[in-house]
């Protein structure tokens, strides 16, 4: 009986010790995780606060927006292109490493993109390719070059409307969406200038010409979200083919597409001035559509619409487009003051900072689309009723970009 009692006590002690060690290891792991988080100084620039917030929240770039598995996606490339610009400004390797780790997790040893299917002809898939030009220059890793060529092949075979505009996806026949300009044209321009002696520049300009000619609202000069050249889809205006709503993030995508395409568009090309003209036109009309706060509504031209709200991602994209347009000499210098005032209004309206100096950006429109199943009719009310999120990638990335341009 005595021996049994001793045995039980020893066993209990072992169990207790094991439990103690297990709890201690969890605590140490948690402390290690906390220690590995990037410390954010209170005096850090807004660009660095934003980037470090993203690094702390998403240790792996493929996790951005709560994505559960590695994915080749424009949300990541939008954010990482901002990291690329921050790296170029600061030379801090952690920003470059974040980009490289994403590429290396999504591209296998043979240069194949994880779960990429060219037959989907999803124009969003082209966008992450722009991250690979610099990575290839730095590393000379041939896998990056292989993917660049794969994406160029997609552009070459991407279905087109009768007028020559890229379909947004295989499942959206004869439809150009305004965000598609941002998804394809900066990559396409950099590729053709780098590898083709600029032979496709006229085709790139044509994509913007089609958007300008067919998506523009005659009253406001702003652009609708999409255009169906066949005019057959349920959301299309039977006379013009346009979708019903002018969306602030759509305006933002358009402005970003212009300023980032112009980064590579040669000054001596006859179409360069035309693209600058498009940028000046949309800048003027976007500023006219500003609210009194200096920000932009989700449904840009109808501030009085029930349920309409000031939207952060579109506002940040427009601010970035204005600021970069001035910095590059495409827009009059007066727009810089407008961008600075809107940036300050953006912080006041949308940005909160916690005790660790991490930021939260509120009122980001959830992803909205057209057609599909269930059918999205694209009405003003549909956009106004879209749920909002905090810290969604379009707002974080565009805020980071605008902070870089404004040196905030």
Image (spheres, grey):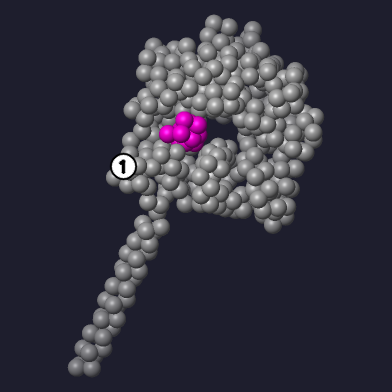
Q: Is residue 203 left or right of residue 262?
A: right
Q: Can residue 59 be seen here?
A: yes
Image quadrant in which the C terminus is located: top left
Residue 28 place in picture, x, y as percent: 34, 66
In the picture as drawn, the residue positioned furthest to the left comes out as 2
Q: Is 346 located above or below residue 391 in the figure?
A: above
Q: Which residue is depicted at the point 74% across and 23% down?
A: 268
Q: Which residue is depicted at the point 37% across and 24% down?
A: 345
Q: Is residue 134 left or right of residue 283?
A: right
Q: Is residue 401 magenta?
A: yes
Residue 55 place in picture, x, y as percent: 45, 48
Q: Which residues are magenta?
A: 396-408
Q: Which residue is depicted at the point 32% across and 76% down?
A: 18
User: 91 or 135: nearer the eye?
Assistant: 91
Q: Can residue 170 be seen here?
A: no
Q: Which is the main secondary structure of the residues drawn in magenta?
A: helix
Q: Is residue 277 left or right of residue 356?
A: right
User: 243 or 223: nearer the eye?
Assistant: 223
**The quadrant where residue 31 appears:** bottom left
Category of crowding for the residue at label 1, using alpha-carbon neighbours closer than 10 angstroms: few (below 14), some (14–19), many (at least 20)? few
Q: Is residue 257 magenta?
A: no
Residue 403 place in picture, x, y as percent: 46, 33
Q: Is 135 located above or below residue 156 in the figure?
A: below
Image quadrant in which the N terminus is located: bottom left
Residue 376 place in picture, x, y as percent: 54, 23
Q: Secondary structure at mark 1?
A: loop
Q: Which residue is depicted at the point 54% across and 23% down?
A: 326
Question: What residue is pinned by disc 1?
Answer: 354
User: 102 or 370: nearer the eye?
Assistant: 102
Q: Is residue 88 left or right of residue 309?
A: right
């Amino acid at each position: 009986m005595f021996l049994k009692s001793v045995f039980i006590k020893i066993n209990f002690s072992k169990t207790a010790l094991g439990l103690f060690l297990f709890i201690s290891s969890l605590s140490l792991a948690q402390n290690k995780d906390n220690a590995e988080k990037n410390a954010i100084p209170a005096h850090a620039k807004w660009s660095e606060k934003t980037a470090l917030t993203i690094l702390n929240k998403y240790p792996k770039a493929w996790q951005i927006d709560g994505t559960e598995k590695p994915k080749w996606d424009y949300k990541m490339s939008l954010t990482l292109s901002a990291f690329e610009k921050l790296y170029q400004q600061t030379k801090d390797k952690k920003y470059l490493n974040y980009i490289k780790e994403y590429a290396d997790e999504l591209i296998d040893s043979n240069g194949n993109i994880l779960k990429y299917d060219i037959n989907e002809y999803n124009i969003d898939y082209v966008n992450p390719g722009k991250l690979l030009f610099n990575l290839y220059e730095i590393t000379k890793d041939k896998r990056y070059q292989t993917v660049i060529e794969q994406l160029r092949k997609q552009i070459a075979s991407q279905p087109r409307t009768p007028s020559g505009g890229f379909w947004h996806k295989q499942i959206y026949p004869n439809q150009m969406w305004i965000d598609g300009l941002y998804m394809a044209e900066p990559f396409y321009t950099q590729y053709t200038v780098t590898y083709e002696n600029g032979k496709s520049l006229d085709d790139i300009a044509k994509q913007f010409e089609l958007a300008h000619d067919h998506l523009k609202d005659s009253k406001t000069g702003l652009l609708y979200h999409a255009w169906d050249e066949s005019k057959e889809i349920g959301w299309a205006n039977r006379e013009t083919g346009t979708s019903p709503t002018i969306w602030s993030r759509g305006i933002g995508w358009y402005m970003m597409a212009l300023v980032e395409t112009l980064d590579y568009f040669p000054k001596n090309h006859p179409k360069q001035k035309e693209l600058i003209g498009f940028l000046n036109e949309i800048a003027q009309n976007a500023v006219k559509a500003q609210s009194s706060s200096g920000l932009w509504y989700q449904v840009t031209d109808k501030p009085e619409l029930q349920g309409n709200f000031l939207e952060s991602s579109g506002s940040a994209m427009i601010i970035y487009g204005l600021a970069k347009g001035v910095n590059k000499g495409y827009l009059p210098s007066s727009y810089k003051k407008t961008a600075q005032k809107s940036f300050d209004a953006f912080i006041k309206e949308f940005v909160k900072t916690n005790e660790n100096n991490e930021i939260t950006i509120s009122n980001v429109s959830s992803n909205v689309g057209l057609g599909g199943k269930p059918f999205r009719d694209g009405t003003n009310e549909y956009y106004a009723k879209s749920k909002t999120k905090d810290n969604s990638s379009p707002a974080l990335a565009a805020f980071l970009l605008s902070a870089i341009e404004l040196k905030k």
